[in-house]
Amino acid sequence: MRNNLWLGRRLEQIWELLFQDTQRKNNVIIKFKGKWKNKFGHIKTLKNKDTEIAVNSLFQSSLVPEYIIDLTIAHELIHYSHGFHSPLPKLYSHPHKGGIVTKELKQRGFANQLSLEKNFIKNEWPKMHQELTKYNRKSRSSNYSNLIKWFRF
């Protein structure tokens, strides 16, 4: 079952296996959050100086391949290792400067997953996103219709 506990374990496994060279200088929290069409995840610094990694909540579905989640986690960990939203020294002026994230993902063994992700984004994600959000769209529009009917007496 894909929940925040499962996601935390994936973060620990990826960090241990592929980011041993990245020192953890603060508390890093990861959770499913948001239901985005054009964003798989983000990283931010919380008010208490913890780092939060958010992964698209739609990825809790077993329809989404696990490598997409792993790649999203690794992407955000690269930002962390470069000093973006972490206490580590900032290595670049912009988080994606010169394609640095993609280059580093390849260096860390994610070349195949990047290729699969490209195909997933182009050929699978649009339909999958529509399917995963269909229920929410219907319920919102029907709630609105019911509200209008109620005000008409």
Image (cartoon, grey):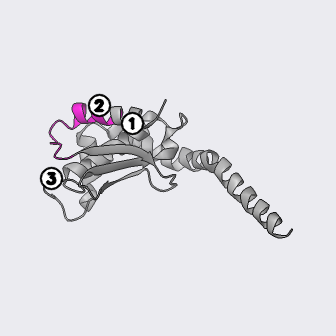
Q: Which residue is mark 2?
A: 13
At label 3, counting other C-alpha atoms closer than 10 Å, the crowd grade (few under 14, some 14-19, many 20 or more) is some
Kind of residue at disc 2: Gln
Q: Secondary structure at mark 3?
A: loop
Mark 1 and mark 3: Cα distance apart in space: 23 Å
Inspect the image, locate mark 1, and give the three-letter code of the amino acid beneath it: Leu
N-terminal of the pair, mark 1 or mark 2, is 1
Q: Residue at x 43, y 43 (%)?
A: 117
Asked whether disc 3 touches disc 2, contact meaning CB atoms under 8 Å apart, the reply is: no
SS state under label 1: helix
Name which quarter of the figure residue 148 lies in.
bottom right
- Under circle 2, the secondary element is helix
The residue carrying pointer 2 sits among few (fewer than 14), some (14 to 19) or many (20 or more) residues within 10 Å by Cα, namely few
Q: Which residues are magenta?
A: 10-26
- Assess whether mark 3 and mark 1 are in contact (beta carbons under 8 angstroms): no
Query: Disc 3 designates what residue?
Result: 88
